[in-house]
Amino acid sequence: MTTAQTSVDLDVQPSPLALLLLGREADPKSERGVECPGDLPSPSDPDLVARARAAKEKLGDKVFVLGHHYQRDEVIQFADVTGDSFKLARDAAAKPEAEYIVFCGVHFMAESADILTGDDQKVVLPDLAAGCSMADMATAEQVAECWDVLTEAGIAEQVVPVSYMNSSADIKAFTGKHGGTICTSSNAKKALEWAFEQGEKVLFLPDQHLGRNTAVRDMGMSLDDCVLYNPHKPNGGLTVEQLRDARMILWRGHCSVHGRFSVDSVNDVRERIPGVNVLVHPECRHEVVAAADYVGSTEYIIKALEAAPRGSKWAIGTELNLVRRLANRFAAEDKEIVFLDKTVCFCSTMNRIDLPHLVWALESLADGKLINQIQVDAETESFAKLALERMLALP
């Protein structure tokens, strides 16, 4: 019996999860899997750049285009500002005259922009399927169940949730409701210091690596102070004793891009490029961070390369679009900048925002048609904003 015959005979049907991942089903609570309505321009259309420029010019001050550092160059060229997710959300909030905020990033970023901007401003995501695999690794239902586990273990009152900016509005709202704060990769240490002033333990969502690296590398904790909560196992795969003994309860989530880098990558690049400086993002695994020369956020990486001496050599462990853009930018200063891994690795969901989607979004808005609006409901927004405001109040 052939493979084809087997699938026909068994009448195999795609699972709901498979359809979601393929973008053939919609889930408003998910960062992914939402079809894009409307007719997109062809990627081969030679007039795409001119069309985007014309639509943006027609909209004038009514539109403000945000471009995350990991976006393609073809999209970044139309961004009014570039930056990391939180910087862009704040930039949008500082532009109250813009009726439309077009966010070239991913879903959770657009949610944050909607939370921080005025009620009369409309946030648009050019492709609704541009999500974040890390943000998807913690759902509101899973986190609520985790809190029940902590309650049954008798430690919930001692736990302060700290959620990474790379999380859904639902998770940010949970954090706000339970007395916690949000953090970025730049201020994670400050956020944890604040949290430990409020309670004895931290539930860190959803990126285990940023939580572990900050606790151990920046705050002097040991790996034994950290436990990993797996939402797919009963009680997170942990005993009551492990939960009671832990200081950091790390959610089992990670970035699919930064999680690819390994110590072998670091060793290999050191052999290939003598004198190279290895600079990685704190979303990388702990052993990679320990093997690197420098560790920091996206903004830190950019500033480090700006300040680097002429002729220096750098291997960067972060998303490839940014690394390639930095390599081109500093080539004239004789700075050698390479991607840490030999394997090409773009952020696949971030790359869904391409020029055809951006043109479609801008032309639709220029024609008076509001498409792909990202809206966070009032209750979720209220608690999520509370968590974000706690972060903004950090020293």
Image (cartoon, rainbow, N blue to C red):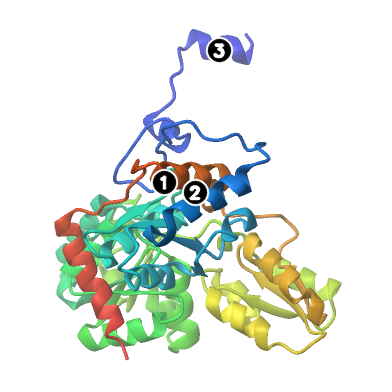
The location of residue 96, given as percent across then percent down, is 30, 68
Circle 2 residue: 55
Disc 3 to disc 2: CB gap under 8 Å: no
Between marks 2 and 1, how big is the CA–CA gap?
A: 6 Å
Disc 3/disc 1 C-alpha distance (Å): 51 Å
| The C terminus - image quarter | bottom left
The three-letter amino acid code for the residue at tag 1 is Ala
Left or right of 80 on screen, residue 96: left
Task: Between label 3 and label 1, give the one nearer the viewer.
Answer: 1
Q: 139 or 330: nearer the eye?
A: 330
Q: Mark 2 and 1 residues: CB-CB less than 8 Å, in contact?
A: yes
Helix, strand, or loop for circle 2? helix
Callout 2: 10 Å neighbours few (<14), some, many (20+)? many
Residue 6 is labelled as: 3
Residue type marked 3: Thr
At 22% from the left and 63% from the top, the residue drawn is: 173
Inspect the image, locate mark 2, and give the three-letter code of the amino acid beneath it. Answer: Ala
Q: Nearer the viewer, mark 3 or mark 2?
A: 2
Residue 383 point in image, percent of width and height: 18, 66
Callout count:
3
Q: Dot 3, crowdedness within 10 Å: few (<14), some or many (≥20)?
A: few
Residue 353 appears in view: no
Horizontally, residue 131 falls left or right of residue 319, namely: left
Whole-percent x and y of residue 321? 64, 60
User: In what element is the residue under mark 1?
Assistant: helix
**Residue bearing mark 1:** 366
The first of marks 3 and 1 along the sequence is 3
